[in-house]
Image: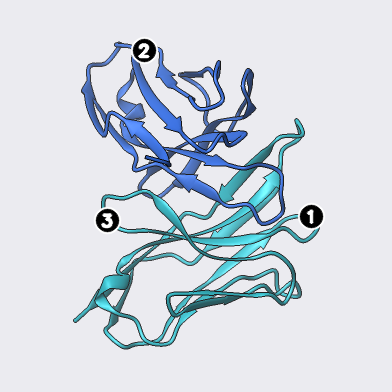
Chain colours: A cyan, B blue
Amino acid sequence: GDSVTQMEGPVTLSEEAFLTINCTYTATGYPSLFWYVQYPGEGLQLLLKATKADDKGSNKGFEATYRKETTSFHLEKGSVQVSDSAVYFCALPRLATSGTYKYIFGTGTRLKVLA
Amino acid sequence: DAGITQSPRYKITETGRQVTLMCHQTWSHSYMFWYRQDLGHGLRLIYYSAAADITDKGEVPDGYVVSRSKTENFPLTLESATRSQTSVYFCASSAGLIRDTEAFFGQGTRLTVV
């Protein structure tokens, strides 16, 4: 079935370091792909998205490119800040067998950025 | 205020009691979802709904009941709470079956079953 696999965390980086969080997916067709971020004590909020192959989503200095050859959507940021400390989730929306619609999430990757 | 709100934010209940978590959205989104978040499991889908009076089971529906009599509300009931249902519960909504449609999440309800 459809699934999303994220790299294990936690990831601990120093401020201004380069960040990569890996995400690969298994799905039929070419689904849209999302990255969500969850700050401490809050719900999830959309960070960026890509709707077709080779699209690059970007927001707040984060980027992710939809690569159909490797079925991947890795999240990157060139210089992280302490305020980026959060849990990051990769997700894809899928049609359920009943014809309705649901989101599949990865297990999340916790990022801690040290000053 | 527009948005999606969950209540209560925190709840402690005893094993065997019935408890209902509320979710309300103001966008008239067709789709609504309930997830639970547990360490090591990420987000797991409990139930979802495509419209009023249409609900479907997710990955982990056992022990939970939902209803959706109105588009804007999607309450989740634990019929007889167990300690394994201690978790953080998130409600979400989405405009529907459009390719790039995102889901919007509530702030979560932290439920402790003692």
Q: Amino acid at mark 2?
A: Ser
Q: Quadrant of residue A12?
A: bottom left
Disc 3 crowd rating (10 Å Cα; few below 14, some 14-19, many 20+) is few
Return the chain for callout 1.
Answer: A
Residue B62 is left or right of residue A19, and the answer is: right
Numbered disc 2: secondary structure: loop
Q: Residue at x 30, y 25 (%)?
A: B83
Identify the residue under disc 2: B80
- Which mark is nearer the camera, 1 or 3? 3
Q: Residue at x 35, y 28 (%)?
A: B84
When the figure is inspected, residue A89 is found, relative to residue B80, above or below; the finding is: below
Identify the residue under disc 1: A28
Where is residue B51 shown, x and y percent of the image? 64, 27
Q: Amino acid at mark 1?
A: Thr
Return the chain for callout 3.
Answer: A
Q: Amino acid at mark 3?
A: Pro
Of B71 and A65, nearer the camera is B71
C-alpha gap between disc 2 and disc 1: 38 Å
Return the chain for callout 2.
Answer: B
In primary-sequence order, the first of circles 1 and 3 is 1
C-alpha gap between disc 3 and disc 2: 29 Å
